[in-house]
Amino acid sequence: MGNQKSINLNADVFIDDLYPTLPDAASKMGGLIPVSLSIYGPAGVSEYLISRAITKRVAYKNWRLNGEFIRDPDDQPHRFDDLAAGDLAVFEFSGDPVPQKVGLLLLSAKSAVDSQLHAVLSPLIPGGNKTMVAITRESLANAAAKAPPSHPIWLFARDPELEAALEDAALGGGKEVQDVSKKRGKSVSAAALAAAKVSAENNGRDGEALAWCHLQKLKAEGQLAAIEWSSQANAVSPFDFLVKSNANKIVKIDAKSTSGEFKRSIHMSLSELMEASTAERYDLWRVYEINEEGAKLKIAESISEFAKSILANLKPPTGVMVDCVSIDPEVLKWGDALNIARPTEGED
C-alpha cells in the first residue's frame, strides 16, 4: 500500500457537495477537524474504530483524512494485506456543520465478498484527477443488490426493508423488525430504534402539516365549508381534522404519515378505532413518500365498518387491553394518488 498516511478528500465533492461551510469553520478550529473513524472491510470484516483528523494544508487544493498509518488490529494481523491499487473506499460523513464521524468501507477486487460490489462501483469513478464522486444511498443500495445481507455496505446504503421495519417497531409494531433482524443475523440497536421513533414522530408532524395545507387549499377553492385541526388543539384527539362539507356533513380525518412507500403498515390506536366505528364518516389519509418538495396522498373514505370488524374480533382475556393494531394498506379501498406540494415562502 506504500507509505501514504492520508486519503485525499477531493474538494469538488467533499466541500462543494457535502460541507460548503467547512473552510470557515475549520479556520476557527486551527485547520484540524477531529473525527472518529469506523473502518469496515475489506471482505466484509466488521468495524474497526480509531481516531483521526481531517486537515488541509494552506497550499493544497484538497482536504485529507490524515494521521498515522492504520495498522492491522491485534486480533486480525493480516486484515489489510490484500488491498491493492484500484481498490475502492466508500465514505459516509456524519455531523453538521463539520464532520464528527466518518465511516470508511474498503472494497477489495480480490475478495469474493467484495468483488461484485467492486465491479459495479468502479465504473462510477472517472479517473485521472477525478477520484471521488458523490453517490446517493439509494444508488448504493441498487449497486449492492446482490451483496449478502450481513455485508457492511448495508450500513452505508439505504435499506428500505430495515427502514420500514424500524418505523413499524417505533409506531407500536414488532414482527417486521424481528423478521429483518433474524434475516440479517444481528440485533437492532437501541440507538437505531430510538432514532426511528424520532423519525416517525417528525414524519407524523410533517404529514399532518402537509395534510392541513391540502385542506386549506380545498377550502380556498370552495370545496369545503369549514376545517379544523383538532389534534393541534387536543394532542389526544382520536382524529386529526374535523371537516364540514358544503352539504353540512361532518367528516373526521386521521392522517397516517411516512417518508417511505405507500405499502408500509398503518397503525391505529384503540381510541381511533372506537371513534371511527361510531363516526358518521371517518376517513384515513395516507400521506407517504414525504420529501423536501411535499408528499403523496391517498384517501380511504368511510372506514367505520372496517373499524367495527376489527373491534368485533378483538377478544383478549380479562385484564388485557389491545392498545394498537397494524394494518396492511392493501386491505382498504383507496382513491387515486394526489400530490401535496409544500407552500412556497409567503404562502399561508
Image: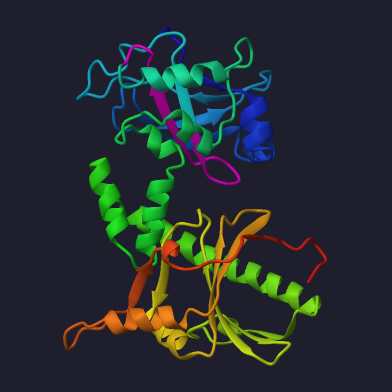
Q: Is residue 203 magenta?
A: no
Q: Furthest residue to the right?
A: 346
Asked whether, in this view, residue 159 is left or right of residue 313, the answer is right
Asked whether, in this view, residue 89 is left or right of residue 115, the answer is right
Q: Residue at x 31, y 36 (%)?
A: 149
- Measured from the top left, where is residue 46 in percent x and y? 29, 32
Q: Quadrant of residue 190?
A: bottom left
Closest to the observer: 117 or 195? 117
Q: Residue at x 67, y 26 (%)?
A: 12
Q: Is residue 112 above or below residue 305?
A: above
Closest to the observer: 338 or 35? 338
Q: Quadrant of residue 97?
A: top right
Q: Where does the C terminus fall, quadrant-wise?
A: bottom right
Q: Is residue 107 magenta?
A: yes
Which residues, given as a range, are shown in magenta? 92-111
Q: Where does the N terminus fall, quadrant-wise?
A: top left
- Measured from the top left, where is residue 294 in percent x and y? 66, 58
- Measured from the top left, where is residue 258 in percent x and y? 51, 60
Q: Is residue 24 above or below residue 67?
A: below
Q: Is residue 318 above or below residue 307?
A: below
Closest to the observer: 238 or 135? 238
Closest to the observer: 143 or 126? 143
Inspect this view and state whether residue 50 appears.
no
